Image (cartoon, rainbow, N blue to C red):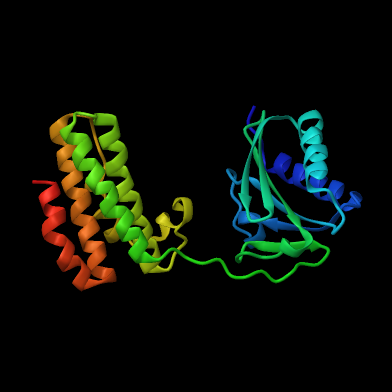
Amino acid sequence: MIYTPLERSALRGALVAEARADARITGAALTGSAAVGAEDEWSDIDLAFGLAADADQAAVLADWTAAMYAEHGAIHHTDMWSGPTVYRVFLLDSTLQVDIAFAPLEAFGALGPTFQLLFGSAVEQPARSTPDPVDLIGMGWLYALHARSSIARGKTWQAEYMISGVRDHVLMLMCLRHGVPHSQGRGLHLLPAATTAAVEPTLVRSLDAGELRRAFGASVDVLLAEIAEVDPALAVRLTRTLRELTA
């Protein structure tokens, strides 16, 4: 059973109504794609709730979780934390994902452009920091070192994992350079086609040793190219050593 946009909208409206009726919740906001009018048929429900100063966060979570299972078809959930805010992510039997952030009063506010206040008031939040490109470069060559050793040891699945790790950090660097969202691949479709075309050869097509070495060499090529965009002098320092990894 797959959800429809109409069913998704109806459930979101019901959840917001339930939040208005819960005295422990003092504010609610749309987050995610709905907050900026960018929903499509595959979008999730993303909501954020601000809790009253005297609210017991654990008790609110427990009550809302019980209701999601009993009334709204949840079959599992998982949590992600950001400071004092817990993001409880529910999977419904319809395959719909429902993300609800339960934030203490002082943490309820926009962390980015995808925040549309529905009721209550929000507190201004410090801007989220973006990754330091030099840190991403460091992670890139670290994955490259382990890709080299994994191939040499015949650990083909680990080698594929490490090569993919190099590529993931290259793509994050590209997103930062082009000013598009870098987290979880959200901005990759916004990168210029010529930019992403350069990364395609890094895709591992099989676990054959020769293929792993080919993809690894391609990943080092694009990593060095992206390093040069950030710090040409650093690219010069790293080139010989990184090239030796693929020799």
Residue 113 place in picture, x, y as percent: 61, 66
Give the vertical position of 243 relative to 77 (above or below). below
Left or right of 203? Residue 72 is right
Give the vertical position of 170 relative to 144 (above or below). below
Q: Quadrant of residue 120?
A: bottom right
Residue 207 place in picture, x, y as percent: 22, 29
Residue at horizontal 63 percent and vertical 60 percent from the top: 37
Residue 92 place in picture, x, y as percent: 67, 32
Residue at horizontal 29 percent and vertical 30 percent from the top: 157
| Count of marks, rendered view | 0
Residue at horizontal 83 percent and vertical 48 percent from the top: 56
**Observer-nearest residue: 236 or 207?**
236
Residue at horizontal 60 percent and vertical 65 percent from the top: 112
Residue 73 place in picture, x, y as percent: 74, 30
Left or right of 21? Residue 150 is left
Left or right of 53? Residue 204 is left
The N terminus, quarter of image: top right
**Observer-nearest residue: 142 or 216?**
142
